[in-house]
Structure formats: C-alpha cells, structure tokens
Image (tube, helix red, strand yellow):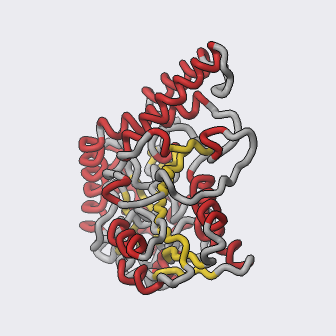
Amino acid sequence: MTQPIYLDYNASTPLAPEVLEAMTTAFRDVHGNALSTHVFGTQARDVLERARAEVASSIGAMPDEIVFTSGGTESNNAAIYGVAEALASRGRHIVVTAIEHASIEQCCQVLERRGWAVTRVPVDPQGVIDPRGVEVAIRPDTVLVSVMHANNETGVVQPVAAAARAAHAAGIPVHTDAAQSMGKIKVDVRELDVDLLTIAGHKLYAPQGVGALYLKRGTPFEPLVRGAGHQGNRRSGTENVALSVALGTACALAAHELDTRRAHLQAMRDRLETRLREALPSLVVHGGGAKRLPNTLYAAFPGCDAQELLSRLDGVATGSGAACYSGKTTPSKVLLAMGVRPEIATATLRLTTGRKTTEAEIDTVAERLIAAVKALLAESTT
C-alpha cells in the first residue's frame, strides 16, 4: 500500500531523526531522579538543564525561565490559571482574543463560571485583531492579557508585541500561545515583549506529551501542579528527562534550520495554493491578505462539503479545521469570528506543509483535490 501523503502538520508532526536519537539515548542512559543528590541524580539534572537551556536559547529566554510541561494544553492552562490565581486579589478580569485555542477559551469559561469577567477581542475579516481593541478592553481590574501568536487554523500571525505594549502600559502581564509558530517563524520573547509563552513539542518534530511554558522572572504565578517543588516549585512532579531532551533537541534544530525551513514550507504551500487557484477560480483563502505562517493554507471550496471532500481524498491526510474538532461538520468558531458565512466555513480544508514535504507530493495532492472538487460540483448540478 502506498504511504499516504501527510499535509496535517499543524495537527502534529513526525519525530525528527535527530530528536528520536537524542530521546532514545536519554531513555537508555538516564534513569536517575533529577532531585537526587547521588551521581545518577546529578547526571539526570545535568542532562535536563542542558535541554532547558536549548529551549530557552531558541526563544531568547534564560534557562531558569523555562518550565517543562506535558504539552501545549497544560502550558496554556497553567498560564491562565497561574496568573489569575496569583493576582485574584488585584482583579478578576482577563482579556483574550475571539480566536484562541480551546485550551485557552475553556479556561476562560471556567473562570467566568467562578465569577470572573472575560473580554474577547474580535478579529477583522482576515482574522487579525486590532491592538487598539486590547487597549480598549483593559479595565482597572484586568490581570492578564492573552493573545495567540499564530492561529492554529488560519495560520494568521497576530500583532502580539503591539498588544503587549498596551497591556504593559497598564502594568498587566501578557501571555501568548506560540504552539503553532515555534519552528515556522521567529519566536523571541523579548521582541514579542511577553511574560508567558506556550510551546508544544509535537508541533515542532518532538514527541506528543511534552511542552514548555516560558515564565519571565518575576511574573506572578501560582503553580497548577503541586507537589515536592520541582522546577522551582512552578510545576511539581519528577521530570521526564528523555522527553525534555527531545523538546530541547527539537528547539535547537528549529533554531538552526529556521530560515531554510521557513523558505521550504512557504514554497510548498505557495505551490499548492497556486495550483488550486488556477484550476478553481472560486477558491477562498482565509486570511490570505494577512501575514500567515509559511506552511498554512486554510481554504474553502464553495459548493462542496469539507467532510465529503476529505472522504474522496484517498491517500491524503489532512483536516477540515482545527484538529481538536476534526470529524464535526459544525462551522469553525474561528471562521465565524471572522465573519465567514457558515456554508463557506463548512467547505473549508486546512492543508499544512512540513519540513519533508516534496513537490511531487504537492502536485499529487493538487491533482486529487481539484478532481474531487470538480466531481462534487458536477454532481451538485445534476
């Protein structure tokens, strides 16, 4: 059986060989507890701290500002709840965007049920927030602003630094979810001017089940996971050294090859988009007029149902929106927030390229997708 073509890199990425090798070595050779004082504990701690330094270096942070987590969802939860709890005596209001990932939005919904107020800054038709919307949303009782770096569906990059300036002018800490942008575009915590930042390993060629939270020195924070005080009492629990090594290696690899990776991702994405536009004039590219991640094509095929299209794309692995909601035919909340009509939203596919995507794969997907769309449109007129 021919291996399916994978164009769902925003959902998850395969392990990079370098990451697999480093992780395997750590699994085999390191079994001590990093809190132990004997030689095996010292070995584990040294390996763990090298990994922490690699993650920190990739985003312009200091090693002690990196907290290893189980992934992007935990990092987002920890950021929202951690700051909210630490500053609850100062205020009970949070500002987020209308297009945040579910791991942010659902935390906000929980806080609302507990009496907090949450303001969701809207986006324009391209899926971009206006930083002035953040400034207007800030109140005397606001304790946190969270603006995702790049949207997981559209790939649209948000003006995080501008939003952060407005928040910091009012003395409010800022979080950004950089799960999708890491490894695709430059991510620098100083340039973004953020106090907390989320990293998800499986979005940048590390394993599923590991991530990190950048926590700037001095940021008010109450730990989500409590116990024996690991990681500076910011996330207790014996660290998974091998997975941390994997994340560190993936971050170092991403930093090393960022320019060439970004160019390749965009070349493959643009090749696919060009082929589709030429053959399907009615194609709608969501966020096409905004700055996007170089690998993301979020496009609607008017007159087609996305789930039906997926069923006809034999040998192509992709999705019809956020991976968390794959299989559902309800319109994407992100697209609805952009003002996209439901019938266009439900005709949308997300096609995302990766570091090993080839021109031959792109051309094959284009041919199959164009044929499937034309067949569906022909059937709908008979």
Residue lying at 47% horizontally and 28% vertically, measured from the top left: 50
Q: Which one is nearer the viewer's eye here, 259 or 69?
A: 69
Q: Where is residue 355, by image quadrant?
A: top left
Residue lying at 35% horizontally and 60% vertically, measured from the top left: 192
Q: Where is residue 31, by image quadrant?
A: top right
Residue lying at 62% horizontally and 82% vertically, measured from the top left: 117
Residue 39, above or below 47: above
Q: Is residue 274 left or right of residue 163?
A: left
Q: Which one is nearer the viewer's eye here, 116 or 220?
A: 220
Q: Position of residue 164 (x, y in %)?
A: 39, 69
Q: Position of residue 81 (x, y in %)?
A: 64, 63
Q: Where is residue 150, by image quadrant?
A: bottom left
Q: Position of residue 7 (x, y in %)?
A: 43, 50
Residue lying at 42% horizontally and 86% vertically, measured from the top left: 136
Q: Which one is nearer the viewer's eye here, 107 or 208?
A: 107
Q: Which one is nearer the viewer's eye here, 87 or 325?
A: 87
Residue 286, above or below 361: below
